[in-house]
Image: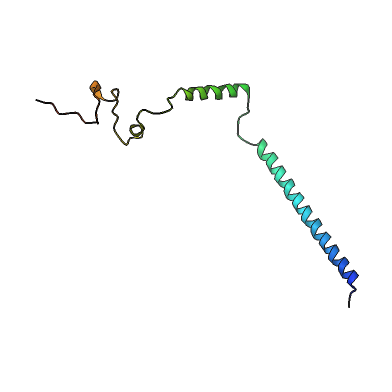
Amino acid sequence: MNASPIETQQDVRHERQTRIRVGATGLAFIVLVVLLAATFSGTASNEPELTPEAMAEDAASETAEAEVPAEPQEPLAEIGVMPTTTPEAEPGGQQGGGEAAPDPE
């Protein structure tokens, strides 16, 4: 029943090698599954192909967006927090705080 120390060391070494082999095989399998999933999901995407025509359309849309003024004149008026005070927005071209001044009569 008593095993010699040499046999015990060999059993421990053999068990360690078996565990390393199983772990490495499991890692390789997981890497393979991830690579296959990435391959199939990449080919099944709904993104349009990148063609020269598509690139030209993207560039045209970017230049159209660049023509919009970078800073709004009245950001609070644009989001509806405050009335506009620009001459174009008020009838009669009056500028002011949003309320008309009473007539002096």
Instruction: State the residue lying farthest toward the left.
Output: 105
Count every numbered label the image shows and give the total: 0
Q: Residue at x 53, y 21 (%)?
A: 60
Q: Quadrant of residue 41?
A: top right
Q: Quadrant of residue 19?
A: bottom right
Q: Work out whether residue 28 or residue 4 is closer to the camera in this orientation and state it.
A: 4
Relative horizontal placement of residue 22, taking residue 43 as reference (left or right): right
Q: Residue at x 34, y 34 (%)?
A: 76
Relative horizontal placement of residue 98, taking residue 8 as reference (left or right): left
57 in relation to 10, above or below:
above
Relative horizontal placement of residue 79, taking residue 97 as reference (left or right): right
Q: Residue at x 89, y 74 (%)?
A: 3
77 in relation to 30, above or below:
above
27 in relation to 10, above or below:
above
Query: Where residue 37 appears, x then y in whole percent?
Result: 69, 43
Q: Quadrant of residue 90?
A: top left
Query: Where residue 54 appears, x then y in whole percent?
Result: 59, 24
Relative horizontal placement of residue 27, taking residue 67 as reference (left or right): right
In the rendered view of the protein, which quadrant contains the C terminus?
top left
Q: Work out whether residue 64 or residue 95 is closer to the camera in this orientation and state it.
A: 95
Q: Residue at x 36, y 35 (%)?
A: 79
24 in relation to 66, above or below:
below
In the rendered view of the protein, which quadrant contains the N terminus?
bottom right
Query: Where residue 10 appears, x then y in whole percent?
Result: 88, 66
Give the colour scheme shown: rainbow
